[in-house]
Amino acid sequence: MPGENGPPAFSDAFTSARLAMVETQLRGRGIRDERVLAAMARVPRHRFVSAERASAAYEDHPVGIGEGQTISQPFMVASMVEAAEIQPADVVLEVGTGSGYQAAVLAELAAEVFTIERVPTLGASAQRLLAHLGYANIVVAIGDGSEGLRQYAPYSAIIVAAATPSIPQELVEELRENGRLVIPVGDAEEQELQVVRKLSAGPRVENRYACKFVPLIGRFGFSRS
Ligand code: SAM
């Protein structure tokens, strides 16, 4: 966890773009959790896209990362992480590593982050970059995250960064009691961001807002892209 207890990483040329992103796109649109805002002010988002796309990294939209995939819009990352209510001792699972950016944001806030990616080349390059940036509390796995990642469960929170047709029961099972699952549920065109809280009486599902993600492809996701 390079950021939280050390000096902020504010020394690169992209700093002003990153701080403007935090103020206008995140705080200005209602993200209130100061820990989430501070984490996103620290993580060098431009390092998670190709050099040709670095100048677009802090813009208000997703950016292509190859293999037909994207790094999610900054507001969407902040909103999902805030909804997951991450605490410092939490063990978190992210489904859909992509570039590794959201895993880095989570690693600033939680004790341990496990992240699983279906596309091996993306998982491998995210793992290399995260290690290079000094994130020692992230494990990258390759596989079908629609089935969860049972060997490290239970998790305090699970964030799914791709669209699912329904809530995979396996993911709910891998949550601790009072754990939170943040997941876009719907068809391939549009989804509703849902927050599932695992209570002793059973899961409680809350709808947040409409969103659009690339599909989660796998056993409990969509069958193809
Ligand atoms: N969180 C990522 C980031 O910060 O860059 C962005 C995630 S991108 C919107 C969605 C990712 O989910 C893609 O990289 C895609 O390959 C991955 N994915 C799709 N189906 C998956 C599955 N069944 N298991 C794991 N990853 C999957």
Image: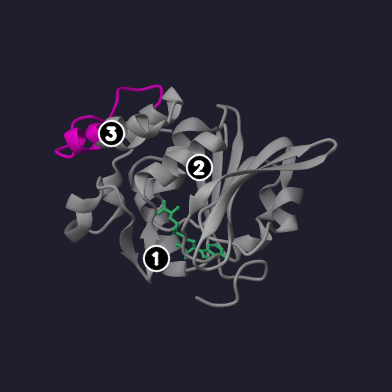
Tell us which disc is closer to us: 1 or 2: 2
Q: Secondary structure at mark 3?
A: helix
In terms of depth relative to the viewer, which is nearer, 61 or 66?
61
Residue 76 location (% of width, % of height): 43, 46
**Nearer to the camera, 62 or 205:** 205
Residue 164 pos. (x, y %): 60, 62
Q: Secondary structure at mark 2?
A: helix
The residue depicted at 67 percent of the width and 66 percent of the height is: 220
Tag 1's secondary structure? Answer: strand
Who's the residue at 53% across and 33% down the image?
110
Q: Is residue 9 magenta?
A: yes
Q: Residues within 10 Å of mark 1 (few under 14, many from 20)?
A: some
Q: Mark 1 highlights which residue?
A: 69
**Mark toward the viewer: 3 or 2:** 3
Q: Is residue 123 left or right of residue 204?
A: left
Q: Which residues are magenta?
A: 3-20
Give the residue number, with chain letter if any, for mark 2.
80
Residue 103: mark in rendering: none
Nearer-the-camera pick, 178 or 29? 29
Number of the label disc, if any, that sits on residue 24: 3
Which residue is outermost to the right? Answer: 201
* Mark 3 to mark 2 CA distance (whole Å): 17 Å
Q: Do the CB atoms of the residues marked 1 and 2 lie less than 8 Å apart?
A: no
| Amino acid type, callout 3 | Thr
Inspect the magenta stretch and tell me whether residue 42 lies in it. no
Quarter of the view holding residue 207 = top right
Crowding around mark 2 (Cα neighbors within 10 Å: few <14, some 14 to 19, many 20+) is many
Side (left or right) of 174 relative to 194: right
Q: Is residue 137 visible?
A: no
